Image (cartoon, rainbow, N blue to C red):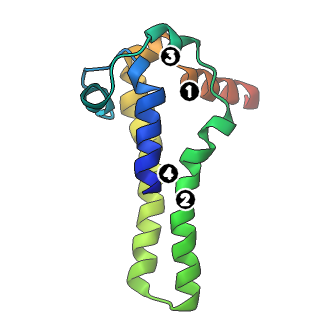
């Protein structure tokens, strides 16, 4: 349920204002959003400021695997451990590859103005 709430939140507060609203974006949310919500204001997307605190609920999705780890300690199971490791690899590694190499790299909204892109670029510029 938490994952569904996160997706709902993203669709309602970001995708409605995105360039890809009603179009097929790299993550498929533009089309889905247009089926559920009415179009927002694209300027609001560009002007929006995003901080790491705003991304915290997205990172909290890791709570479910943490609960699984606790359950593994209580009643160890190799299959559950392998599936948990696979989930982490696909979630973090896969997400980084997909966003870095495919979706964000070719995104029209990034060129127009994307708050997440500004946040991540600011972070990488500060560490350089």
Q: Which residue is mark 4?
A: 92
The mark found on residue 62 in the picture is 2
Q: If the image is split into quadrants, where does the N terminus sit?
A: bottom left
Residue 41 picture quarter: top left
Q: Secondary structure at mark 1?
A: helix
Q: Secondary structure at mark 2?
A: helix
Q: Residue furthest bottom?
A: 75
Residue 18 picture quarter: top left
Q: Residues within 10 Å of mark 4 (few under 14, many from 20)?
A: few
Task: Give the residue at x 69% y 30%.
Answer: 123
Q: Secondary structure at mark 3?
A: helix
Residue 31 placement, left or right of 64:
left
Give the mark nearest the N terminus, 1 or 2: 2
Residue 125 versus residue 40 in the image, above or below: below
Q: If the image is split into quadrants, where does the C terminus sit?
A: top right
Residue 43 versus residue 86 in the image, above or below: above
The mark found on residue 116 in the picture is 1
Give the mark nearest the N terminus, 2 or 3: 3
Give the mark nearest the N terminus, 2 or 4: 2
Q: For marks 3 and 4, give the one nearer the viewer.
A: 3
Q: Which residue is mark 3?
A: 45
């Amino acid at each position: 349920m938490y994952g569904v709430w996160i997706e709902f939140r993203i669709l309602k507060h970001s995708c409605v204002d995105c360039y890809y609203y009603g179009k097929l974006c790299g993550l498929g949310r533009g089309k889905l959003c247009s089926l559920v919500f009415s179009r927002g204001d694209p300027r609001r997307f560009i002007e929006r400021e995003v901080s790491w605190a705003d991304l915290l609920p997205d990172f909290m999705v890791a709570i479910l695997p943490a609960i699984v780890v606790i359950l593994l300690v209580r009643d160890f199971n190799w299959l559950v451990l392998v599936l948990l490791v696979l989930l982490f690899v696909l979630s973090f590694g896969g997400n980084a590859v997909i966003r870095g190499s495919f979706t964000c790299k070719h995104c029209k909204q990034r060129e127009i103005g994307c708050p997440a892109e500004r946040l991540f670029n600011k972070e990488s510029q500060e560490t350089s």
